[in-house]
Amino acid sequence: MRVLVVEDDETLAEIIAEGLREHDLVVDVTRDGAEALERAGQIGPDVIVLDRDLPILHGDDVCRALVRAGSPARVLMLTADGAVESRVEGLAIGADDYLPKPFAFIELVARVTALGRRTPPRRPTVLRRAGISMDVGRHEVRRGERSVQLTRKEFGVLAALLRAEGELVSAERLLDTVWDEHTDPFTGAVRTTLKTLRQKLGEPDPIVTVIGRGYRLP
């Protein structure tokens, strides 16, 4: 699940982001409404944690713009105003859920997770190529008749390769798709994950490496 946190309080934004990452979620952070809309269009998050009182573009306007654009992302709106009227107003303009500050972090995680389950599927749930089948919804992978147990990152990398349908996928694209902006772009995470993924998929190696360009499934 990919989450976009939109919060102008830098400390709170990082606390939320780090906490969600500890629950194995991919998290990106922006701190104003205009940047939030741009980033949402780029990464296609499943859930947006949206502070209502944002600079440049108010959170209400961000929510309205997402609705107009037909974004499938679910919106959890945060605000310091916990009055019933404010909650009703936030839901009326398109938010899917509403959480007043201060909040218990375990409740935030529970609400984000619940919203993520309600996000409509945007891609086929079963992917197949090169003798590999992946049931995205069940988090199951098979190579031929053999079940393959993968970590979340290995699963994400394999999903990206399957969805590319034989086209090359660069290491940069894998970082952007499977990890998040918090990841060091010079990390060896992609190379390490591909190594363990290859080991688990077994011989013959189904992943083709094109040096300097990326990876693909034949």
Image (cartoon, rainbow, N blue to C red):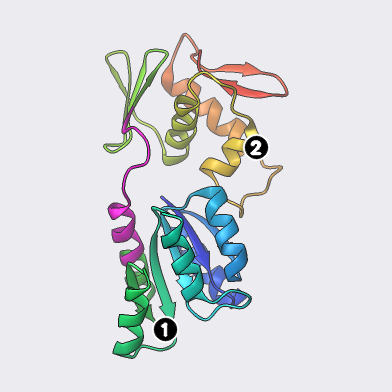
- Is residue 123 part of the magenta span, yes or no? yes
Counting the numbered discs, the total is: 2
- Is residue 164 part of the magenta span, yes or no? no
Please give the name of the residue rendered at 27% of the width and 14% of the height, measured from the top-left corner: 145
Residue 124 x %, y %: 34, 32
Residue 149 x %, y %: 35, 30
Mark 2: give few (<14), some (14-19) or many (20+) Cα within 10 Å: few
Please give the name of the residue rendered at 42% of the width and 20% of the height, measured from the top-left corner: 201
- Work out whether residue 183 or residue 9 is closer to the camera in this orientation and state it: 9
Residue 101 is marked as 1
Please give the name of the residue rendered at 69% of the width and 45% of the height, measured from the top-left corner: 185
Residue 109 is marked as none
Mark 1: give few (<14), some (14-19) or many (20+) Cα within 10 Å: few
Q: Is residue 36 above or below residue 44?
A: below
Mark 1 falls on what kind of element?
loop
Residue type pointed to by label 2:
Glu
Q: Is residue 203 above or below residue 23?
A: above
For residue 37, which quarter of the picture? bottom right
For residue 139, which quarter of the picture? top left
Residue 168 x %, y %: 59, 23
- In this image, 37 relative to 88: left or right? right
Label 1, label 2: how far apart the Cα atoms are: 36 Å
Magenta-highlighted residues: 111-126
Residue for badge 2:
172
Specify the farthest residue to the front: 68
